Every structure is written in structure tokens, then in C-alpha cells.
Image (cartoon, rainbow, N blue to C red):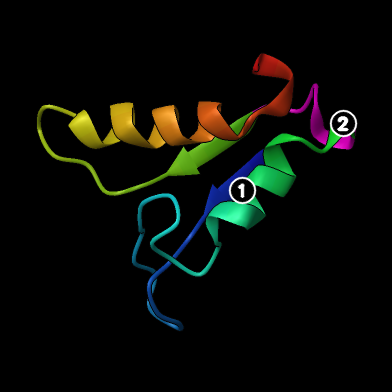
Amino acid sequence: MIHTLSTRSAPRHRHEHIGKGAISVKGFELLVNDTRFEHIPKILETPKSEDLHEDVENMRILRSLVKWLH
């Protein structure tokens, strides 16, 4: 299992959205396209509101980075 967590600032544990924290969009692109991790489950922790609209946007961004989906 891979647990991805991008934070705003160290050493505090504050979650951030895709491309807004310490892991860049390019970093996530490299991760989602690395075939060594193809069959490994992944967990993504990001900030959430009650309607979870942020999850929809974060997943849209991640899916747009996957090269084999295009």
C-alpha cells in the first residue's frame, strides 16, 4: 500500500490538495504512471468539506495525469 500525503508545511501534519502541497503535480504524475506501483493500492489524504467536492476535483486531476487512460 502507498499512502500519499502532500502537506503545506513541515513539521506540522496538514493535508493539502493535489499540486498545492510539497508533492508537485509532476510528482503525482510520476507516481501514477510508474508501472512498479500499478497493482499496489494507494490512499490519498486531502482536506474535506461536508459535500466532498474536493475529492471529485482531486480525483479529476489524478485521472488526467494517468497516461494510459488517454
Residue 70 image point, x, y percent: 65, 17
Q: Secondary structure at mark 2?
A: helix
CB atoms at circles 1 and 2 under 8 Å apart? Answer: no
| Image-quadrant location for residue 50 | top left
Instruction: Examine the rendering and report whether any part of residue 27 can be seen.
Output: yes
Image quarter hosting the N terminus: top right
Q: Using residue 47 as the reference point, say whether residue 4 is left or right of it.
A: right
Is residue 23 shown in magenta?
no
Q: Residue furthest front?
A: 70
Which residue occupies 81% across, 34% down?
37
Q: Using residue 20 as the reference point, say whether residue 34 is left or right of it.
A: right
Residue 39 image point, x, y percent: 80, 21
Q: Secondary structure at mark 1?
A: helix
Where 44 falls versus 5 (above or below)? above
Which residue occupies 71% across, 27% down?
67
Where 10 falls versus 62 (above or below)? below
Kindly identify which residue carries mark 1: 28
- Spatial separation of the CA atoms under disc 1 and disc 2: 13 Å
Q: Using residue 15 as the reference point, say whether residue 43 is left or right of it.
A: right
Kindly identify which residue carries mark 2: 35
Main SS of residues in magenta = loop
Assess disc 1: are there few (<14), some (14-19) or many (≥20) residues with their C-alpha within 10 Å of its C-alpha.
some
Q: Residue furthest right?
A: 36
Instruction: Examine the rendering and report whether any part of residue 1 can be seen.
Output: no
Which residue occupies 65% across, 28% down?
66
Q: Which residues are magenta?
A: 36-41
Nearer-the-camera pick, 1 or 31: 31
